[in-house]
Image (cartoon, rainbow, N blue to C red):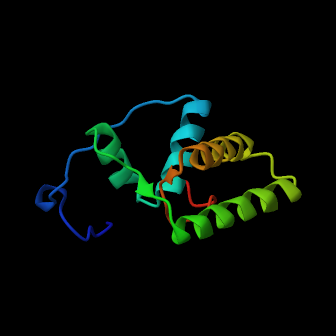
Amino acid sequence: MRKVACKREARFRRNTIAFLLSDEEKAQVEARIILSGLPKGDYYRKAILGQEVAVTAGNYMSNRVAKVLGQILEHLRNGNTEDEKLLMELIKQLIEIGQNGNAPAGNRDISETD
């Protein structure tokens, strides 16, 4: 029998909410999560509760954008088309960031979406 580190009843957050997304919606959400730099649970809670999820751009954001662009380029060079929808959504989000001057930041890789 698997030993649980913490009983579900003892947790502060013990309720689960699930919902279905299309492939395109999933790619959009995953791209935003990556660029936000937040754990998925935190991102979902903030987004659903109407809290702002953006971080003002700065030097750190410039480095983050460069890192994500490098990862996108690497995936495209390797012919990795499995993540094509996610890559396209990341590119759209990065373009939006460039136009708005505001952006979410983070330090996860695009391969850490699952």
Q: Position of residue 109 (x, y in %)?
A: 60, 64
Instruction: Name the one closer to the observer, 105 or 43.
Output: 105
Instruction: Name the one closer to the observer, 87 or 103.
Output: 103
Report whether 55 appears left or right of 70: left
Instruction: Name the one closer to the observer, 8 or 46.
Output: 46
Q: Residue 88's quadrant in the figure?
A: top right
Q: Position of residue 99 (x, y in %)?
A: 60, 44
Q: Quadrant of the C terminus?
A: bottom right
Number of labels in the image equals 0
Q: Is residue 107 visible?
A: no
Q: Residue at x 28, y 70 (%)?
A: 3
Report whether 90 appears left or right of 5: right
Q: Quadrant of the N terminus?
A: bottom left
In this view, 92 is above or below 13: above
Q: Residue 70's quadrant in the figure?
A: bottom right
In this view, 71 is above or below 76: below
Q: Residue at x 74, y 56 (%)?
A: 72
In this view, 5 is above or below 41: below
Q: Is residue 69 visible?
A: yes
Instruction: Name the one closer to the observer, 95 or 18.
Output: 95
Q: Residue at x 19, y 57 (%)?
A: 8
Report whether 28 appears left or right of 71: left
Q: Position of residue 26 (x, y in %)?
A: 55, 37
